[in-house]
Image: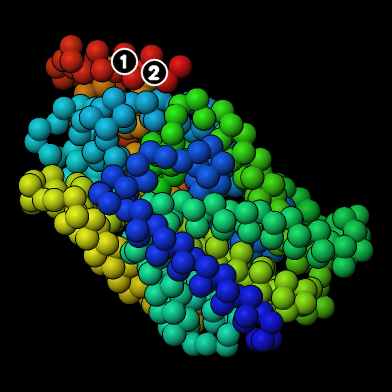
Amino acid sequence: METATLVTFSAYLIGLLVIGVVSYRLTNNLSDYVLGGRTLGPGVAALSAGASDMSSWLLLGMPGAAYATGMNSIWICIGLTLGAYLNWQFIAGRLRSYTEVAKDSITVPDFLENRFRDRSKALRSISALVILIFFTFYTSSGLVGGALLFQESFGMSYNSALLIGAVVIISYTFLGGFLAVSWTDFIQGILMFLALIVVPIVAIGKVGGWSETVSTVANMDPAYVNVYEGMGFLAIVSLLAWGLGYFGQPHIITRFMAMKSVKDVPAARLIGMTWMVIGLFGAIFVGFAGIAYFANDPLIVGDIDNSEKVFIMFTDVLFNPWVSGILLAAILSAIMSTIDSQLLVSSSALAEDFYKAILRKGASQKELVWVGRFGVLLIALIAVILAIQSNPANENASSILDLVSYAWGGFGAAFGPVIILSLFWRKMTRNGALVGIIVGALTVIIWKQIEGGLFDLYEIVPGFVLGWIAIVLVSKLGKEPSREIVDEFNKARALSK
């Protein structure tokens, strides 16, 4: 690697650690550590939500998919855009007001327990367990992306690159908690946004413009420019169904909970959706331009594991070392911005939903913060072990997109119906929520193990549908919610308007 690239890249990493140290000094209690004291403005909330959403798959997985298969990958973007908009439009304001009304809930399990007055701790425990299971896989996908970046950029072995990337990410999350995560995500979101504008524009320009790029790709294989190529009904539904996942992603919806006011939601929605649409289509254009640019020196076309390196390849061949360093930092930003949020939500599940709620109810705020910090280390360690198993050199290794797909589906099916109905249906019950989470999560896990025919449908679809049905049936069969719960529901609804 060029010295200039190394200097730029290193300066970025040092800057993140500085933010972690500063945020450490501003973190006094568990609410500060896991929710930042509800102080996020619309810009930081929007970009941190977007950056934590769009993990390494946005700069590695998505361009890789477009490079390997062409424009049919656009269906994921359409599904995600619709899902994100609906999430901002209908969930953000209601969740912000309801979590404050419901005993100032600071985590998703905390909210569900308070919303349904669950004194058994079953709802909190099951929710926290689902978070820990699926976030471990999700975090692992990000660590794989970080390892690929360090491996390609510094010529390291995969395992060495994995450990170095993990240490950097864990350090500032361990120190600064939510504030460090949100502000680093804000900066990382800007970097990612700029990278996904600059790289495709420069790449397409080098090929000879958009028309020449399309012509070159079409001449190589007309299938690359056909959005319906290889897309049967189940395949299109599966890709569009990614949008269902937004309603149940704890690391995204906690940004709604952390906003200063419900009144900030419209501005945050505009900022977040603009960032997202440009970023998604920029990622597709990177991969699509890569087909034409690397036509005479291709990556392994059709092999998504190797295709996921296309963005990294572009930073190396198109830009001078100083710019290359910034663009590599953008890739690391995409990776970090999701992993830090996932680690934080996982650690809050351990500290707030297991340690404080079940094991040690009288724990001090300082003690809980440190439990949260050590929770970061524990979850990261397990994720590193899984990431080692996902070394692309291994014959049965999963791609970044595969790992993200599984975790995304798990959260969407387990929490999506529960969050939506808890905010919009006053007659939903605790047992309905509990059964809905279990049915959604188990459906994803079981469906994933079966292949062929209908089982090729993305597991989030049956998980979401069956989870929703379970909630409605169990709630209708059980005792109606108490007057206290209904009054609180009405109060939260009024405040969200």
User: On the image, numbered disc 1 is attached to which residue?
Assistant: 491
The label number, if any, that marks residue 13 in the structure image: none
Can residue 369 be seen here?
yes
Q: Tell me the element at label 2.
A: helix
435, 161: nearer the viewer: 161
Q: Which residue is mark 2?
A: 495
Determine whether label 1 and label 2 are within 8 Å by CB. yes
Is 412 placed left or right of 27 in the picture? right
The answer to whether any part of residue 463 appears in the image is: no
Which residue is drawn at the image coordinates 9% and 36% (left, top)?
Answer: 120
Question: Closer to the camera, 482 or 185?
Answer: 185
Q: Amino acid at mark 1?
A: Lys
In this rendering, the answer to whether 186 lies above or below 159 is above
Would residue 357 be found to the left or right of residue 348 on screen?
A: left
Indicate the position of residue 246 as horizontal and vertical percent values. Answer: 47, 40
Q: Residue at x 21, y 18 (%)?
A: 485
Question: Colour scheme used in the picture?
Answer: rainbow
Query: Which class describes the residues within 10 Å of circle 1: few (<14), some (14-19), or many (20+)?
Result: some
- 186 lies above or below 263: below
Image quadrant where residue 154 sits:
bottom right
Q: Quadrant of residue 96?
A: top left
What is the secondary structure assignment of the residue under circle 1? helix
**Residue at position x 38%, y 14% from top?**
494
Residue 270, image x and y in percent?
62, 34
Q: Pointer 2: residues within 10 angstroms few (<14), some, or many (20+)?
A: some
Q: Amino acid at mark 2?
A: Leu
Q: Which of the 4 quarters of the picture holds residue 95?
A: top left
Whole-angstrom CA distance, mark 1 to mark 2, is 6 Å
If the image is split into quadrants, where does the N terminus sit? Answer: bottom right
Counting from the top left corner in percent of width and height, residue 421 is at: 35, 25
Q: Residue at x 40, y 48 (%)?
A: 251
